[in-house]
Structure formats: structure tokens, C-alpha cells
Image: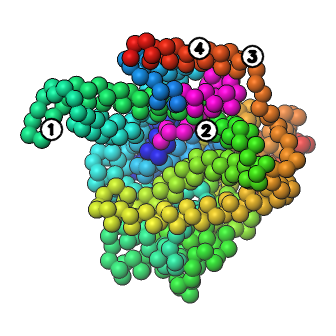
């Protein structure tokens, strides 16, 4: 697997030297491979949002380095600026940053800043809007006339239009209804599959992480607490619960079953797995 | 960046000065400013400076923070010093072309700079040790007599509280929006003035939209809790004067007396 992004000894301190001093990220080492679909999970204040703002050079580490394609993104001004476009960051509630009069103008903000030709900008705008389920008839509408979910999709398109190699999303589904949630995640996974983009998404929901991610990183108190594939992570469900973090409901059910003495295996985190596991137990003639 | 603005920032630490009634601090700071302008002579200023340093030590505010608050007025101080130095008539010490520096000018310049610095330092101490809400409460309380002549004192105080309350929120919001636009390649740091002003449009539009949204939400929330102005409203935190406040008044009065004596005796 080819490494695309790496954080090494990353530490970030807010307001150093004042009573408000706070170490938000403490000596974090993390390596992300090309094409991964990574979920970053943790409590509010565990340092997730601070961490991801280092990936596109919005925050300069107090200590440590961030490498993109093996190059330190703070090496020179050009590299830093390039990192901004190579790593697309979608903030929480991105609809709050819409500002142009038309959707087309807003989505084209990123590509225009990249200095692309007008035809290329136009192609990207249309394509990225389509990737977020919006047709060309929307181009001339005002982004302020849209519904909340639609605004979010326009904002997402605004980042996709830069065609980043790594897409970083901070709670992309926060505040959306279940349908808006499913939509957003569908667009993101489809985009990931089509372009092979590396995706890192911050979430509070273990269900979403279990359902979508190929790898889960759990943060706790400014540190990386766990890092692994979903089966690896959820086989340590007990530890997660102890740390005050959530696990998918079905994992919780199976944890309880094990406690009650049923010989089901660890690390069950989808309903399908659960069904198979129960069938297996039945076949082997053990009652649950 | 934006968060580095320190003027008017509250520093929540435990100290006797923090625990004083906001009205006490407001009155004493105001009195101190008047005394500063009445004081005269080397020793009087030394005493005033010692007073500010003493309160700083007592309030557990770091001197670095105090110096930081003086930074924005550095230019003003230098400018005042220069003007005083060059335009005060008197015994000439040094001359060049149309410029002459006089002994009296030099003296006034030093006094003026010290005066400005102490002025800013003392008001900064007030805002460092008093939360904005407590401060507006104190102002409302002290100006209450004016409501007799139908001045909307409570409404003004409420407006001030809300404005102060939302400064950090809006700063945070601005930073968030700036970051979001930076993530899309916006560049706020290069180019000429016009280009930079233009670069702010993607920040200002969302900022205004959100400020109006917040104002709207806040007004609805206030109406939902039946807010209808100041009359008949009670407080969760009543302003209360304690023993410490009495002590503060006493100490400060003695201090002011000393400053006056020094001004008279050792001008």
C-alpha cells in the first residue's frame, strides 16, 4: 500500500503562555494509505478537528511534521499552498461558508483560486455538482434559496471541484435528517469508489464508522487510542465502552451475549455478521 | 491571529481582585484615572506606577499580559513624546535645524508617556479581572438613577452585554469561515490593498448571514422566556459589596492621599 499522508510526532498547543493554554493534539503518529476510507472517532474535545486541520496546512504544528507524498507540507510556501488543494477539507456545517450569488460561482471558488482555465473550471463545477446529485439546472440558482441538506451538498461540491487526492470531512452528516445523512454518505462513498480518493471522515457515530470505513482511528484525550480495521477495533468493544465511547448496537448485544456465556465470537459489528454468527452457533448445536 | 487581541479580555483566575465587586473596581479605576491626571512630579508617578504593579501582583495577572495590552498604544505614546519633546518651550538642550529639544519638553514627554501607559494598564487590569457581564451589570447599577429621567439604562446595558457576549463568538466564527475559505485556496495575506479587501468578501458575506441568524435566534429565545425589558426583573447574581470592598476603598483612599501629598510636597 502506498502511503499518501503521514503525521509524525504531531503536537498542537492552543494559546501557549496564557491561562487558556491547551494541548489539543499530543504527539500523534498516523500514516494514511492511498485509497483508504478512514473514520476518525472520539469525544468532543479529543482533538479530532484540530488534527485534521493540520492535514491541509491550516494549522502549523507546534511540534512534529505532516508529510504529503513524503514531503513536509511546511517545507516551502509553494508546497503548503499545493497541500491546500491536494487535501480538500470540508468543515463542520460547511453550508455556513457559502457566499456567492449563484451556486456555479460558489462551487467554482476553489478551482478559480487554483488558477485553472474557465472551461476546466466549468467542467469541474458541473461534474462535482453531479457527484452530489445536483443537475445543471441548479447552476444559476442562489445557494441561499436551498434547503439545509442541499446547501450542504453544494458546499461539498465546492471542495470536490478542486479534485483533491485526499478528502477530509468533519462530521459531514451533523444536523441532517436520516435521509440527508444517507444521501451525503452515498455521495461520498460513490465519489471514493469512482475516483479512488482517499477519504478521512470525522464522526461521533460508531454505526457510521462501522458501516463505511475500511479503517478506524479512535482518539482520546489528544492521543490516538486505537487504530485498526473495524473488526480489530470492535473486538475491543469492552475497552471502548470503558473509555466512555460508543459501539454499534449490535456489538453491544453480542458483548452482552458473551458475558452471559454464549460462545459467540468477538468483533461483530454489522447485522449480517450477527446473523451469520447466530446461524453458526445454531448449526454447532449450541443454544444462545 | 484574531485571538491575540487582548484589549478587553477577561482572564479567569482566582485572586482577591477578581472577587471584588465589579462596581468597586469600576469606581476605583475611574478615580485612579482622575488621580493620574492630577498627579504631578516624579515621586507621585512612581507611586502611581507602584500602585498599578501592586494591583497586578495581587490579581495574579502576568506582567507579560499587561505589556501586551500596552502594545497597541506604543505608536500613540511615541508620537505624544515626540510632540512634547519638540514643541515645549524652555531651556534648550540640543538643537538641529528647526528642531530643538528642551529640558522641560523632555520632562513633559516622559510624564506623558508614563501617564498614558498607566492609564491603559489600569483599564486593562479592570477588564482582565472583571468579566464583561459583571462589568455591564455594574454600569447598569451605577447608572440606574438616570432611568428616573426615562433613559433606557437597562436596555443599553443589555445591548452592551449582548454585544460583548458575542465578540468572542463572532471572532471564532470569523476564524472558522476564514479557515474554510482558505481550505478552498482563498489568500488573505498577499496582494495590494484592493485585492486584500476583495479577498474578504467570501468571509464577510457568510459572517453577516450568520450574525443575523444569531440575532434572530437570540431574540426568539428571549421572547420565549418572556423577556420584556428591565422593569421587575430579578437577578441570579446580585452585586454585593463585602468586607474586601471596604478594604479596597480604604486602601485606595490612603493611596490617593499619598499621591496628593507627594504632588504637593515634592513636585
Q: Is residue B156 left or right of residue A30?
A: right
Of residue B28 and residue A245, the one placed in the foreground of this image is B28
Whether A186 is drawn above or below A22: the answer is below
Tally of numbered tags: 4
The mark lying in front, picked from 2 and 4, is 4
Of residue B163 and residue B175, the one placed in the foreground of this image is B163
Dot 2 falls on a residue whose secondary structure is loop
Q: Earlier in the sequence, mark 4 or mark 1?
A: 1
* Residue on which the image places disc 4: B254
Q: How is the image coloured?
A: rainbow
Residue at (62% x, 47% y) in the render: B164
Q: Is residue B15 magenta?
A: yes
* Residue on which the image places disc 3: B243
Q: Which mark is residue B99?
A: 1
Name the subunit of mark 4.
B
Dot 1 falls on a residue whose secondary structure is strand
Is disc 4 in contact with disc 3, using a CB cutoff of under 8 Å? no
Q: Residues within 10 Å of mark 3 (few under 14, many from 20)?
A: few
Q: Which mark is residue B213?
A: none
> What is the x, y in percent for residue A76?
27, 48
> What is the x, y in percent for residue A263?
82, 38
Amino acid at each position: 500500500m502506498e502511503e499518501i499522508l503521514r503525521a509524525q510526532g504531531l503536537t498542537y498547543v492552543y494559546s501557549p503562555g496564557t491561562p487558556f493554554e491547551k494541548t489539543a493534539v499530543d504527539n500523534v503518529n498516523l500514516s494514511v494509505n492511498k485509497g483508504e476510507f478512514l473514520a476518525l472517532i472520539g469525544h468532543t474535545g479529543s482533538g479530532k478537528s484540530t488534527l485534521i486541520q493540520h492535514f491541509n496546512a491550516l494549522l502549523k504544528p507546534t511540534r512534529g511534521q505532516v508529510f504529503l507524498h513524503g514531503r513536509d507540507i511546511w517545507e516551502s510556501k509553494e508546497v503548503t499552498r499545493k497541500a491546500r488543494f491536494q487535501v480538500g477539507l470540508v468543515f463542520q456545517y460547511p453550508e455556513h461558508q457559502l457566499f456567492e450569488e449563484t451556486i456555479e460561482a460558489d462551487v467554482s471558488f476553489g478551482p478559480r483560486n487554483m488558477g485553472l482555465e474557465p472551461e476546466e473550471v466549468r467542467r469541474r463545477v458541473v461534474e462535482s455538482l453531479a457527484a452530489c446529485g445536483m443537475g445543471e439546472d441548479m447552476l444559476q440558482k442562489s445557494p441561499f434559496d436551498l434547503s439545509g441538506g442541499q446547501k450542504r451538498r453544494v458546499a461539498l461540491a465546492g471542495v470536490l471541484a478542486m479534485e483533491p487526492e485526499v478528502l477530509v470531512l468533519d462530521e459531514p452528516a451533523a444536523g441532517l435528517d436520516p435521509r440527508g445523512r444517507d444521501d451525503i454518505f452515498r455521495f461520498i462513498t460513490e465519489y471514493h469508489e469512482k475516483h479512488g480518493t482517499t477519504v478521512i471522515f470525522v464522526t461521533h457515530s460508531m454505526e457510521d464508522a462501522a458501516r463505511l470505513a475500511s479503517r478506524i482511528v479512535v482518539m482520546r484525550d489528544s492521543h490516538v487510542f486505537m487504530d485498526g480495521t473495524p473488526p480489530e477495533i470492535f473486538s475491543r468493544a469492552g475497552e471502548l465502552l470503558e473509555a466512555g465511547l460508543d459501539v454499534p448496537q449490535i456489538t453491544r448485544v453480542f458483548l452482552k451475549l458473551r458475558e452471559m456465556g454464549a460462545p459467540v465470537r468477538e468483533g461483530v459489528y454489522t447485522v449480517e455478521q450477527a446473523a451469520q454468527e447466530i446461524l453458526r452457533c445454531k448449526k454447532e448445536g449450541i443454544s444462545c | 491571529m484574531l485571538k491575540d487581541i487582548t484589549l478587553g479580555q477577561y482572564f479567569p483566575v482566582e485572586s482577591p481582585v477578581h472577587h471584588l465587586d465589579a462596581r468597586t473596581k469600576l469606581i476605583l479605576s475611574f478615580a485612579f484615572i482622575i488621580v493620574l491626571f492630577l498627579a504631578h512630579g516624579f515621586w507621585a508617578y512612581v507611586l502611581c506606577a507602584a500602585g498599578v504593579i501592586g494591583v497586578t501582583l495581587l490579581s495574579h495577572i502576568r506582567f507579560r499580559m499587561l505589556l501586551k495590552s500596552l502594545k497597541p498604544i506604543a505608536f500613540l505614546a511615541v508620537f505624544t513624546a515626540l510632540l512634547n519633546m519638540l514643541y515645549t518651550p524652555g531651556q534648550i538642550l540640543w538643537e538641529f535645524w528647526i528642531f530643538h529639544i528642551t529640558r522641560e519638553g523632555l520632562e513633559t514627554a516622559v510624564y506623558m508617556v508614563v501617564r498614558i501607559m498607566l492609564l491603559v494598564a489600569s483599564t486593562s487590569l479592570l477588564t482582565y479581572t472583571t468579566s464583561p457581564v459583571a462589568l455591564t451589570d455594574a454600569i447598569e447599577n451605577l447608572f440606574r438613577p438616570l432611568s428616573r429621567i426615562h433613559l433606557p439604562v437597562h436596555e443599553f446595558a443589555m445591548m452592551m452585554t449582548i454585544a460583548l457576549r458575542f465578540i468572542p463568538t463572532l471572532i471564532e466564527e470569523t476564524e472558522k469561515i476564514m479557515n474554510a475559505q482558505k481550505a478552498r485556496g482563498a489568500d488573505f495575506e498577499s496582494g495590494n490593498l484592493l485585492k486584500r479587501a476583495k479577498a474578504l468578501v467570501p468571509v464577510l458575506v457568510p459572517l453577516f448571514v450568520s450574525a443575523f441568524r444569531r440575532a434572530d435566534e437570540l431574540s426568539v429565545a428571549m421572547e420565549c422566556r418572556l423577556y420584556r425589558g428591565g422593569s421587575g426583573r430579578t437577578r441570579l447574581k446580585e452585586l454585593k459589596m463585602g468586607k474586601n470592598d471596604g478594604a479596597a476603598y480604604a486602601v485606595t483612599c490612603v493611596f490617593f492621599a499619598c499621591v496628593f501629598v507627594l504632588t504637593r510636597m515634592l513636585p
